Image (cartoon, rainbow, N blue to C red):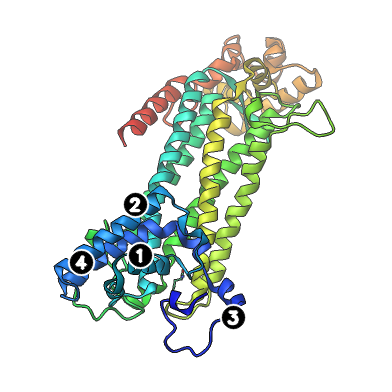
């Protein structure tokens, strides 16, 4: 590369080695910051005007040219990829110099790529958080539609992957909506810390330009400015935060995937995944594999890896900026890209799922999932909980031996275990009764589920 294409070079005698150049350049990884670098640069030019480093006319020319570059980049966001310059900041500055000549060389006054890069990255993070919230909401919306359809579809709920108590498919959907809402809230929390501008920190100890940093911050859409430049140029906590939110949310998507893979298995058969999101085997013609869900589960590992990579990159770095930190963009971009793809894919899977209602119900009736209700029945008749638990355990054993359900046993049989049993116990064992008895907040009763569906819908529409 021509040494003129560098933003430095004065103190060097020799050209950089091509191998080092390839190694050092980050344009292929940070090109997506173009728009944010330009917005930061426009704001910076206004600060330079404020402290008389640029005249009004000069600032105007620079802003006009930067906006022109913005248009070029908007039209073709990868236009810079065939360039050989070092990074996106160099690309924008050199492009500006191309357009306005000598004047362009004034823009970097009092600024460093150290405050510039973290400003651009923070601006990008703010933008991508809004995108992420959009996709999180979209998935919640898909789940709500599915919950509305399936609010009467009874299926077994599990603990230890053993049938535990009956639930509905809608209730399962609502569980994941809760998780996605927490992910959304975590992103909103992160925004608070992202809204502090590092521009004006210079290389590490501040800028000599007499500017109003808070005004500069506001000009870029931040709420305030950082208070210590040594920290500001070396802070990548916000990258870690986004990676950790990505990891937690991917964990939710992975658990959702695992549930659905299980529900879709030949043995369980609660649902059928659509042809849209499954693939076949090259050898076994009968196969229909849940690839989309397996990939979401797999990519969760990749995203965790990104969080680990970034933590390790930052561990042990001395203050302040170090080139190690350049790795952040590739890592963050990869995690977010995977997360967005998985959010979209999960929506598609949920939207196109077919629920085998009868199989779900039959399975919920098996496995003695109504044993808890029988215990409650005895407790209501004055038996202590521990005693009731033991008695019902024995009754379950008898039903297992007879290969029948609890409700198949005769009243006489129940009476052998406790005299308190009466005919009304069968009502208690009815699966719909089991569901509807859980009627306090957060329970599975249809009243609670319908209420929650309404609340979530109201929330989704209102913000
Ligand atoms: N490309 C670098 C990064 O992404 C920013 C440049 C900082 N370079 C420097 N020599 N201070 O981190």
Give above or below for 1 relative to 11: above
In this picture, is 125 found above or below 291? Answer: below
Could you tell me which residue is drawn at 60 percent across and 43 percent down?
Answer: 254
Viewer-side label of 1, 4: 4
Mark 2 surroundings within 10 Å by alpha-carbon count, few (fewer than 14), some (14 through 19), many (20 or more): few
Contact between marks 4 and 3 (CB within 8 A): the answer is: no
Instruction: From this view, report whether residue 126 is shown above or below residue 387.
Output: below
Determine whether the residue tagged by mark 2 lies in a helix, strand or loop: helix
> Within 10 angstroms of label 1, few (less than 14), some, or many (20 or more) residues?
many
Residue 253 image point, x, y percent: 56, 41
Q: Which mark is in front, 3 or 1?
A: 3
The one of 364 and 76 positioned closer to us in this rendering: 76
Give the Cα separation between the discs numbered 3 and 1. 30 Å
User: Is disc 4 placed on a helix, strand or loop?
Assistant: helix
Of callouts 4 and 2, the N-terminal one? 4
x 36%, y 68%: residue: 93
Of the two numbered discs 1 and 4 on the same chain, state the one appearing first in sequence: 4
Location of mark 1 (residue):
119
Residue 416 sits in quarter: top right
Q: Is residue 223 visible?
A: no
Which element type, helix, strand or loop, lies under badge 3? Answer: loop
Distance from label 4 to label 2 (Cα)?
18 Å
Residue 71: numbered disc: 2
- The reply to whether discs 2 and 1 touch (Cβ–Cβ < 8 Å) is no
Badge 3 or badge 1: first in the primary sequence: 3
Pointer 3: what residue?
A: 17
The residue wearing badge 4 is: 59
């Amino acid at each position: 590369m021509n040494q003129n294409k560098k933003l430095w070079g004065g103190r060097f005698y020799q050209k950089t080695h091509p191998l080092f150049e390839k190694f050092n350049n980050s344009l292929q990884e940070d090109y997506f910051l173009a728009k944010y670098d330009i917005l930061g640069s426009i704001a910076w030019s206004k600060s330079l005007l404020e402290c008389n480093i640029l005249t009004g006319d000069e600032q105007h020319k620079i802003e006009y040219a930067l906006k022109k570059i913005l248009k070029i980049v908007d039209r073709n966001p990868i236009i810079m990829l065939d360039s050989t310059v070092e990074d996106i900041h160099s690309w924008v500055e050199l492009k500006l110099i191309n357009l306005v000549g000598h004047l362009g060389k004034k823009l970097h006054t009092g600024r460093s790529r150290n405050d510039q890069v973290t400003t651009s990255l923070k601006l990008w993070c703010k933008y991508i958080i809004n995108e992420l919230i959009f996709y999180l909401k979209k998935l919640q919306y898909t789940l709500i539609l599915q919950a509305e359809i399936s609010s009467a579809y009874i299926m077994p709920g599990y603990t230890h992957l053993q049938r535990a108590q009956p639930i509905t498919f809608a209730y399962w959907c609502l569980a994941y909506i809760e998780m996605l809402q927490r992910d959304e809230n975590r992103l909103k929390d992160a925004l608070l810390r992202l809204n502090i501008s590092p521009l004006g920190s210079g290389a590490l100890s501040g800028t000599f330009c007499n500017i109003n940093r808070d005004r500069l911050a506001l000009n870029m859409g931040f709420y305030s400015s950082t208070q210590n430049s040594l920290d500001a140029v070396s802070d990548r906590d916000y990258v870690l935060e986004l990676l950790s939110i990505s990891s937690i949310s991917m964990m939710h998507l992975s658990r959702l995937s695992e549930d659905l893979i299980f529900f879709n298995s030949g043995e369980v058969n609660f649902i059928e995944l659509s042809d849209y999101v499954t693939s076949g085997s090259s050898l076994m013609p009968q196969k229909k594999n849940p690839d989309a869900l397996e990939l979401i589960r797999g990519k969760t590992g990749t995203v965790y890896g990104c969080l680990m990579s970034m933590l390790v990159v930052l561990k042990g770095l001395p203050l302040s900026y170090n080139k190690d930190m350049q790795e952040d963009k590739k890592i963050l971009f990869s995690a977010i890209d995977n997360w967005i793809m998985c959010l979209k894919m999960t929506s598609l899977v949920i939207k196109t799922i077919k629920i085998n209602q009868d199989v779900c119900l039959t399975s919920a009736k098996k496995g003695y999932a109504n044993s808890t209700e029988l215990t409650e029945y005895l407790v209501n008749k004055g038996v202590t909980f521990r005693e009731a638990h033991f008695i019902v355990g024995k009754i379950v054993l008898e039903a297992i031996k007879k290969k029948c359900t609890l409700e198949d046993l005769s009243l006489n049989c129940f009476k052998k275990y406790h005299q308190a049993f009466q005919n009304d116990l069968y009502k208690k064992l009815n699966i719909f009764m089991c569901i509807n008895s859980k009627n306090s907040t957060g329970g599975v009763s249809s009243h609670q589920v319908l209420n929650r569906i309404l609340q979530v819908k109201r929330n989704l529409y209102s913000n």
